[in-house]
Structure formats: structure tokens, C-alpha cells
Image: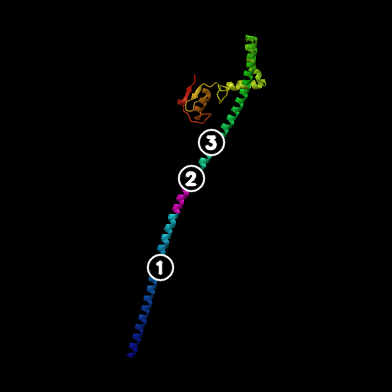
Amino acid sequence: MNTINEKLETALKDTKNALKVEKNLVTALREELSKTREQFSTNRLAHARRQVELEESKGLMSVLKGRAEKAEKDAEKLRTYSKTVEKARVDLEMKLSRMREDLQVIRGGVDGMNEMRGDSTNNGNLSSDGRKSALHYFCAAAKNKKELSRLVEHKFAKFYCTVCESNLKDVVITSCYHTFCQSCVDKNLKTRHRKCALCNLPFGKNDVHKLY
């Protein structure tokens, strides 16, 4: 009987020890689970933050890309404007050079006429032949026939269309007040390239009017 009791006590003691071990194991597992949950929560929060930062970075990149594209467009406009200004400057220099040459020719003609007037004053009057010959001082003031021809051509060039250079100007575009021949303007309207050939300003059919 004592032997049985001893065996029962031993079995009960072993069971208690096993339960204690199981309890410690459960406690350890609970602690591990709690740590895992905390780590998971921390990782999820960090992931959410990274997602927010990524979205903010994408938004910032989009804004910077838009600014870069706008800056490139502005730079292209400035380059185009610079080319236009440079072309205008060259054209103005050429016109100024021609005007100086023309002025020199005119001054030479005027000086010649003044000399003739001085002679006529001393003689008492200016004959009709003298008046006719005075006009030749303007021709004589030009160095050669080529220069005189260029002078005449330059003076009359303003009456001819700047596009074809063969027809007289007979219409005006009221949006910019540049003048051309009807034929060249009609070509632009037919091809739907409705921009002024001089300033590139858009115009419509209603903006075209006859000069005379």
C-alpha cells in the first residue's frame, strides 16, 4: 500500500512539474507573441511612413518635372526671341547703312545745287537749262550707276510686296498693319498658314482689307 502511495505521489509531483514547465512555456510564448505583435506594429508603422514619404517624393518629383519642363519652354522662347531680336538688329544695321549711303548721295546733290545757286546769284538769274542740269548733281553724287540704281531701287522697294517682291502692295492686315499683295495673302489663307510673314502674328480673313 505504501508503495502505491509513493508511486502516486511521484506521479503527482511529476505532473505538477510538467504543468509548471507547460505554464512557463505558455508564459514565454505569450511574451514572444507580444514582442512579435509590437515588432509587427512597428514595422507596419514604418512601412506606412515609407509609403507616405514615397508618395510625397513622387509628388515632389512631378512638381520638379513640371517646373523643369516649364523652364525648358521658357528657355526655348528666350532663344527664339533672341534670334528674332538678332535678326531685327542685323536688318536695322543694314537699313541704317543704306540710309547713310543715301544721305551721302543726297547731301552731294544738295551741295552741287547750292554751288549752282551761288553762281546764278552772281550772274543775276538761273536759266532753265541751269535748273535742269541741277538735277544731274544727284546722279553725279552717286559714285557709279550701280549705286544710283540701288538708291532708286531702295526708294521704290517699299511699294512692292515683301514676300514675292514682284507685285505692288494692295492689302493691309489690320491685326498688325503690315502690307502685302493680295496674291500672297490669299495663298496664306488657302494653305491655312494664317500668320503675318513679317511678325508671325495670326490673322483671319476679316483682318485683310484693300489699301485702295
Residue pointed to by mark 1:
35
Residue underneath mark 2: 67
Name the kind of residue labelled 3 in the image.
Tyr
Q: Nearer the viewer, residue 59 or 17?
A: 59
Q: Secondary structure at mark 2?
A: helix
Q: Secondary structure at mark 3?
A: helix
Please tell me whether mark 1 or mark 3 is closer to you in this view: 3
- Label 2 Cα crowd, 10 Å radius (few <14 / some 14-19 / many 20+): few
Residue type, mark 2 in image: Arg
Answer with mark 3 or mark 2, whichever residue precedes in sequence.
2
Q: How many marks?
A: 3
- Mark 1: which amino acid? Lys
Residue for badge 3 = 81
The residue sitting at the bottom extreme is: 2
Separation of residues labelled 1 and 3 (CA atoms): 68 Å
Q: Main secondary structure of the magenta part?
A: helix
N-terminal of the pair, mark 1 or mark 3, is 1
